[in-house]
Image (cartoon, coloured by chain):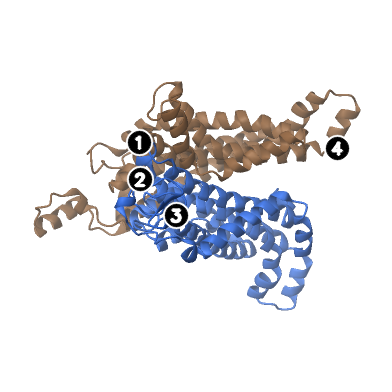
Amino acid sequence: MGAFVARRLADSLIVLVGVSFLAFAILFLSGDPTYLMIPENYTRQQIAEFRHQMGFDRPWYVQYGDFMRHAVRGDFGTSLRSQLPALPLVLERMPATLELAGVAMLLSLAVSLPLGVVSATHRRTLIDTASMVGGLLGQSTPGFWLGLLLILIFGVELRWFPASGRGGLAHLVLPGVTLAMYSMGRNARVVRASMLDALGHDFIRTAYAKGVPRLTVVYHHALRNALLPIVTLIGLDFGVLLGGAIITETVFAWPGVGRLVVNAIYQKDFPIVEAAVVVIAAVFVILNLCVDLTYGYLDPRIRYG
Amino acid sequence: MAAYAFRHIRRSPGAIAGFLLLVCILGTATAAPWLAPQSPTLVRVQDRLLRPLTVRDGIRHWLGTDPLGRDVFSRLLVGARISLFVGLTAVLIGGSLGTAIGLVSGYYGGWTDRLMMRVGDVQLAFPFILLALAVMAVLGPGLGNIIGVLGLTSWVTYARVVRSEVLSVREREFVHAARAMGAPVSRILLVHALPNVVGTVIVVATFSVASTILSEAGLSFLGLGVGAGTPTWGSMLADAREYMTDAWWLTTFPGFGILLTVLGVNLVGDWLRDSLDPRLR
């Protein structure tokens, strides 16, 4: 177990270094940021001095080394617009994004788990067909469009929920549903498939044969065995949800990392983009590490060797 | 395999619906120049925000007009072409690249394999849209750029799936025999390994057309897609936001365009998966 955790940690570290390199490359390829940072009336001499002073005239590997030395200390430079340190700006927005993604995740599981299980146990009935068609629709609907429709119907016409901004529970409803829709559809389909798989095993027949009640067989014997692919999916889901949050936050003016990063991209504020990319990747890597570690708990046959 | 698949389709109403949807969408997209009542970029400010089905100067605006008086139906047709074109070309790029990497990675193993898989891990550690956004921010909007970004960032899934297939194919007798007879690696990969993974690749590619179309729409919605001037479904929705409460048709129709196209592709993908590769279920 210890060796497994160590190896997975090392892997995660390598991935994060790769991510930092990618983030740096994006910044580097975007060109010399000098012109974004200096007043317009600088002379050529002053520009050259400024570039030298900031170190923009050094080769890329020197600049990357420098970037990494600062990055490991949590220093991603200052925002080119607000002149505030980039990392705190990103971290400050993180709770809002995690709140939205977390709610979407709960919503998605709360709907897709029961729907998938019932579809599997009532195969080829109306419930099954309806929920699978619904799942497919959820998976095919562009999130930002759904968001606009929900705003139009429930925010503007019916006025049931606030159409934008962050606040109490009511503010979470529309963006939460919008963000959850895709993974809700996909998860319902995966849960169904993996339940059907589990229900086809011999031990299920044995359990029925020895008179175990149906509900116990479904929820204790089958569901527990069907959980493994679902847990993998939850880890991947978080990546999808964090990515989806970028667009959902823009639609609902939700003050999270997604909106911060989209605005930073419009303003070519690359230190913010870099910090956000690394933070989001780190969250994703840590979550997937946790997912890997739960495998052994769910399925004692898996040994971390 | 194909014969089995086509026997199978008659028992699958979903697949039939998917094919019908796609045929309709592909048909209208192809025939766009003849179907469009007027040029998609023709501005007629005096005809702004007309309701659907309005007739003005002998032209029926089936789906109404936008704030600049441009015909929504004509723009929707051009949007269909772009969505499908971007979806198909990006998947072609990503699929070929990923399959090639997967073949080589799986066959040779060793450090090439470890390096490629690690690079894939790095890329998967990113929410895809964030990577695409950042790259588009650097490159700027444009049709070529969006196809490149969506294509080059989608290789990982193919590479992983193909690699794992090749790992098992590599140890089969017919590959050992080919190697013993002195077949070059290129022949082993293309003639012996590739046909064994083609079904899987087609299934992955089909679903990836669906997700690519969604991604393109999302990026265009954020203003980092094909670029100003070209009507795409995503950018039409972005423009519609301001008029959401006055002109429901501006928000409704482009969204249905995306939904129906992606739904059609997903339905066909489901059927392909069930008939070509039951293991992916």
Residue labelled with disc 4: A202
Badge 1 and badge 2 in a common chain = yes
- x and y percent of residue A84 in the render? 24, 36
Task: Return the residue found at the far top.
Answer: A168
The residue under label 3 is which amino acid type? Arg
Asked if badges 1 and 3 are on one and the same chain, I answer no
- Relative to B230, is A141 on the left or the right? right
Disc 2 to disc 4, C-alpha distance? 52 Å
Crowd around label 3: few <14 · some 14–19 · many ≥20 (10 Å): some
Q: Secondary structure at mark 1?
A: helix
Residue sitting at the far front: B58
- Closer to viewer: mark 3 or mark 2: 3
Q: CA distance from mark 3 to mark 2?
A: 50 Å
Relative height, residue B78 to residue B246 (above, below)? below
Q: Residue A274 has which mark? A: 2
* Residue B119: image location, x then y, percent: 50, 54
Task: Give the Cα distance between marks 4 and 3.
Answer: 64 Å
Q: Which numbered disc flags the more N-terminal residue, 1 or 2?
A: 1
Mark with earlier residue (2, 4)? 4
Residue B60's disc is 3
Q: Secondary structure at mark 2?
A: helix
> In this rendering, would A34 be left or right of A40?
right
* Element type at mark 4: helix
Which residue: 51% across, 28% down?
A103
| Numbered disc 3: secondary structure | strand
At x 66%, y 75%, the residue is B187
Give the spatial CA distance, label 1 vs label 3.
50 Å
